[in-house]
Amino acid sequence: MHSSTPTIAGLPAGPTDAAWWLAAAGGARQWAEQRQIDLRDAIWLLPYSALMPVARRAWSRLGGWQPRVETLATLRAQLGPRVSAGGPGFDPVLNRLQAAQWLREQPAGAAWAQDDRRAFREGVDALVRCAQSMQEAAACRPASERSAWWDQARRSLSGGQGPGGDERLLARIALEWAASAATADADELRELRPSAWLLLRAGGRDPLAESILAEAAARGTPCLVLDADPPRDALFAMSIGLQAPPAECLCADAESEAQAACAQVLEELAQAPADPVALIAQDREAVRRVRALLERFGVAVVDDTGWRLATTRAAARLMTLLRAAQGLRPGRAESTAADQRLDWLKDDPLGLARPRALAALEARWRGRRVPESSQAEAEALWADAQARLGPLLIERRQALAAWLEQLADLCLGEPLEAARWRDDAAGRAVLSALRMDPVPAGAWQALARQVAMTLDDFVTWVDEVLAEASFVPPHDAKAPVVITPLARAMLRPFSAVVFPGTDERRLGASEPKAELVTPALAETLGLEGLSAQREREALAFAQVLRQPRVTLLRRVAEGSEVLGASALVERLRLAWRAAPEGARDLPSVSRALPTRRVAPEPVRPPLPRATTRWPDSLSASAVEALRACPYRFFSRVILGLGEADELDRMLAKRDYGNWLHAVLWRFHLGRTPTTDLEADRERLRAAARDEQDESPHPEGELLPYLASFEALVEPYLRWLHGREAEGWRWAEGEVDRRILPPELGGMALRGRLDRIDRHAEGGVQVLDYKTGSVATLKEHLVDRSEDTQLAFYAALLADDAPASSIAASYLALDDRLSPVELPHAQVGETAVMLVQRLGEELQRLRAGEPLQALGQGALCDHCEARGLCRRDHWAAEDETAG
C-alpha cells in the first residue's frame, strides 16, 4: 500500500553539478522501482523552467524511461488558456486596469484619482497584489474547504472605522474580487492522474504544488518530495566543509564594485570552465555596468532578467509619437513640445522619406532663414504630419480600445512601417504589451471598450505599461556568462558565481510594500508576507553557496553613508567560524580590471589647416570668431559645427531682443517724422501688440519683457524725437547687405543691419540695438580696433558712402532713463583697416597657416568648441617642451 502522505527524502549536500543531479534522479528512480511505478506516466515538478534541461539530461544519462519533467507553469500551459471568470486573472495590465476602473466608478475613488494620482496608483497596485494573494491562497485549498476559508477571511476583514479603515475597505474589495475568480486551472491540476508525483523542493515550499501532492497522496497516488533545502536552523549546512568558503571582495564605491565584479568574471572565464559563470542580478544598476564592461572585453552574455521595455528604442519611438500628438492638441502653444515633434519626425517614415523638407522644417522652427523654394516643402511636410497624427487629436474621452485601434493604424497601417515594428524583437514586445498585435479577445477586449480615457490619460497609461513590462532580447544560449536573479540560480550547474550587491541594503533587507492586510492577519489566512519572502531569499542564498566557487562583492559606502555586510553574509561568516574543523573566516580578495602600459602621449593644442572647404562669404560673428580664436572659426565656419538650441526652452533675454527688434522695425516702417508724441506712443504700442500676436511664445512668458518694453516707450520716443530734431531720419531696418571687397580674394562679407539712419546733410549711420549691459558695451569700445561688430557693419556700407561719412553706434535699450548711444569713433577708418587685415589673414590661412586653438581668456569658459579642441586635456607647458 502507498502512504497517505507524500514521502520526503533528502538530497546530497555539496555542489549542485551534473553528479548531484544524477544522484537526485537516481534516488527518484530507486524509489519508483521499489514501488513498481511506471515512470513513463509520472510527473516530476521543478521549481522553475531553467532546471528542466538539466533534469532531463540527468535522466537521459540514467537510461530507460523517464518521467515528464515539468513546472506548474508548463503544466498549466498544457491545460489551455488561463481564463479568469471576473476575478484577478493572470494578465497584470488587465488586473490594474480593472482595479482602477472599479475604484474610479466610486465617488471617493474618482476624487482620490484626481487629487493624488501617485497614491491612487499605489492603491491600485496594493489592491491587485492583495486580490492575487488571496486567490492563490484559496487555490491551495481543496475545493471543499474554500467556502469556509472565504467566510473566515470576510470575518477577519470586517470592522468599523478608525485607523486602517481605508486599507480594510480596499482589502474587502480585493477579497470579493478574488472570491469571484475561477480556480479552474488549479482544480484541473488536481484532476491529473499520473502514476506518481515527484516534487523537487528548493528555495522554500510551493504551497500549490505541495497541496496537489497532499491530495494525490490521500487518494493513494505515490508522491515523493525531494527536499534540496537545508534545515532552517542550519542554513549553510549543505555547503560548509564540503567546499572552500566563498571569497569576499570589499569595494570603495559602486564603480569599483562593478569593475571588481567584471574582473572576477574574466578571471573565472580564463580557466575555460565547462559550465557558464553566473552573475547574480541582486543590484540591477551594478549588473548593467558590469555587462557594459564585459562587452568591452568581447564577452557574450545571456540575460535571464532582461530590462524594462520602456528603455528600448521601440518604446521610445512610440512615446515620442504620442507626446508629439499631445503637443498638437488645441489650446497648446505652437512652441510646446517642438523638440518632441521634431524627434518624432526624424524617426517616422514621413520624415525619413523627405529629408530635405525635414531639414527645412527644423531650420524654420529654429528661427533660421529658409529659402522660399524649401518653405513650401516644409509646410507640406508639416501639414502631412498633422494629418497623420489627426486620429489622436481628440479632445473628448473615448474608450481605451478606440485609442489602441488608432495607435495600431499609425504603427501598422503601412506595410513598411508594420514590418519595421514586427521585425524588431523590442517592437514586437511593445505591440504585445499594449495588446495591439494580436488583439486579445475576451475579458481584455470587453474591459478596454468600457474604460474611457483622455489623450493625456492614454499616454500616461501607455508609459506605465511599458515601464512595468520586461524585455529579454535575443541572445546566444551558449554564452559563457549568465545574468540571473538569485532565485533562478538555485541548483543550476555553474562553474562559479559572481555576486555583487551583498551589502545590508540590497541583500536580505526587503522593504515592505504598502499592503492592505496586516502581517498577523496574512499569517492567519495563509497569505505570503514579508517574513516568507525573506525566508525564500535566505534559502536561495544558501543554495547559491553550494556552487564550486562563489565571490561576494559589496561596496563599503554609498556617497557619505557607510554600508555594512548583509545580515545573511554575517550569518554565513559566523557559521564558518563555528565549523568543526576550526575557526575560519571568509577569505578577502581584491580584484581589478586588466591593465596595459601605454606610452604617454601629451595632448597638445590642435593645429588644423584649412586649404579647402572655404565658404563663399563671412558674417560678423565668423570674423569675430577668427579674431578671438582661430580654432573656434575652424569649428564654426570651416567644419560648419554648432550647438542647436532646444526648441522647447523658456523665453530668454535673446528672444526678447529679437522680439524688440521686430517691434521697432514694425514701428518705423512707413512712419514719417512727427512731433506728435501721443500718435507715436499709440503706434509703438500697436506695433508691440501686433508682434505679440504673431509671436510663437505664450503671452505668459512674455509678461516680464512686456513690462520692460512699457518702461522703454517714453524714453525711446524722447530720444527719437531729439534725434530727428538734429536732422537724422530712419532709412531702413533689418536689411541684408553683402559686399565683395577685392582684398578678400573673392570672398564676400554679409550681414543683417538692425537700422540705417541718414542725415539731412548726407551722413549715414548704422545703429545696432542691444539689450545687454551698457558697461560691457563700453568695454568693447575702449580700444576701437577690438570692436569687430560695428566695424564690420560699417564695412557693409562701403558701397553707400565714403568711409569718412559713415558712423556706427550701439544703441543700448536697457538703460533705466533713456536709450544710450555708444558710438564707435572713426568707424570708417576701422572698417577699412579690418577688411585689409582680414584679407591678409585669409591669404595666410589659404596658404596653409594653421588655425591654432589659443585656449586663453574668458572666451574658453563658454566656447562650444572646448570639447573639440580638448582644452581641458592639454599637457602642461613643461610636458610639451620635452
Image: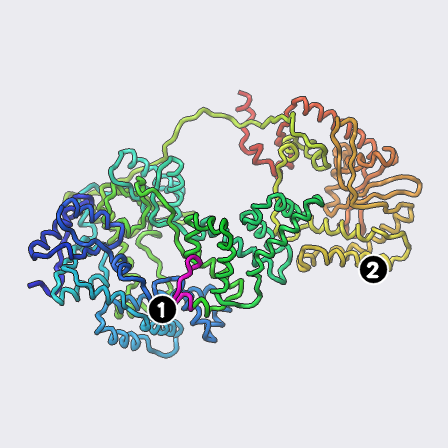
Where residue 726 appears, x then y in whole percent? 91, 46
Where residue 443 appears, x then y in whole percent? 39, 67
Label whose residue precedes the other's in the sequence (2 or 1): 1
Q: Nearer the viewer, residue 880 or 215?
A: 215
Looking at the image, what colour scheme do you see? Answer: rainbow
810 with respect to 638 (left or right): right
In the current view of this chain or complex, which residue is farthest to the bottom? 160
- State whether residue 798 is above or below residue 23: above
Disc 1 residue crowd, few under 14, some 14–19, many 20+, Cα 10 Å? many
Magenta-tinted stretch: 435-446
Where residue 681 appears, x then y in whole percent? 83, 58
Where residue 507 appears, x then y in whole percent? 32, 52
Type of residue at label 2?
A: Glu
Q: Which residue is mark 1?
A: 516
Type of residue at label 1?
A: Leu
Image quadrant in which the N terminus is located: bottom left
- State whether residue 598 is above or below residue 546: above
Q: Element under label 1?
A: loop
Is residue 792 visible to us here?
Answer: yes
Q: Is residue 46 magenta?
A: no
**Which quarter of the figure has residue 261?**
top left
Q: Nearer the viewer, residue 789 or 448?
A: 448
Residue at the image point whose x is 46% and y is 68% from the top: 449
Q: Is residue 443 magenta?
A: yes
Q: Nearer the viewer, residue 239 or 187?
A: 187
Q: Which residue is mark 2?
A: 682
Q: Are marks 2 and 1 in contact (CB under 8 Å)?
A: no
